[in-house]
Amino acid sequence: MPKYLVQATYTAEGLKGVLRDGGTGRRQAVERMAESVGGRVEQMYFAFGESDTYVIVDLPSNAASAAMSLTISASGTVRMKTAVLLTPEEIDDAVRMEVAYRAPGA
């Protein structure tokens, strides 16, 4: 199952929810959300800095990831970025592929 790294930053309204629900309450909400699209949360961390949370999640497809992202963003309480995570073996597969490419101006 593909893995994704979700970096989320709460808006002021979102932070009010964190203050009310606590960290474990937010983790439970994120776990329920991932499960609702056939996935699971591998790890969730709160952090200082630009992003408030980092979540590693296993999801069945890019469509499931997009569904979560659309729903989260539409709430207006969280801004997020998602990165697809690749295993070293997937990179090995990519390295072995023949790619027809011409650089600009070449």
Image (cartoon, helix red, strand yellow):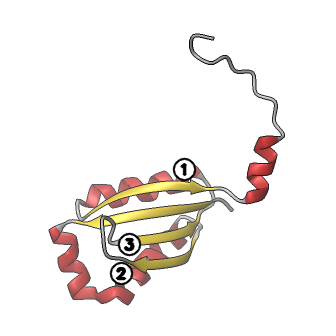
Q: Secondary structure at mark 3?
A: strand
Residue at (36% x, 65% y) in the render:
8
Q: Is residue 7 left or right of residue 12?
A: right
* Residue 85, placed above or below residue 53: above
Q: Nearer the viewer, mark 3 or mark 2?
A: 3
Q: How many marks?
A: 3
Q: Nearer the viewer, mark 3 or mark 1?
A: 3
Name the kind of residue labelled 2 in the image: Arg
Residue behind mark 3: 53
Quadrant in which the N terminus appears: bottom right
Residue at (57% x, 54% y) in the render:
84
How crowded is the residue under tag 1: few (<14 C-alpha within 10 Å), some, or many (20+)?
A: few
Q: Nearer the viewer, mark 1 or mark 2?
A: 2
Q: Secondary structure at mark 2?
A: helix
* Label drawn at residue 63: 1
Residue 60 location in percent, x, y?
63, 59
Residue behind mark 2: 26
- Whole-angstrom CA distance, mark 1 to mark 2, is 23 Å
Q: Is residue 91 left or right of residue 45?
A: right
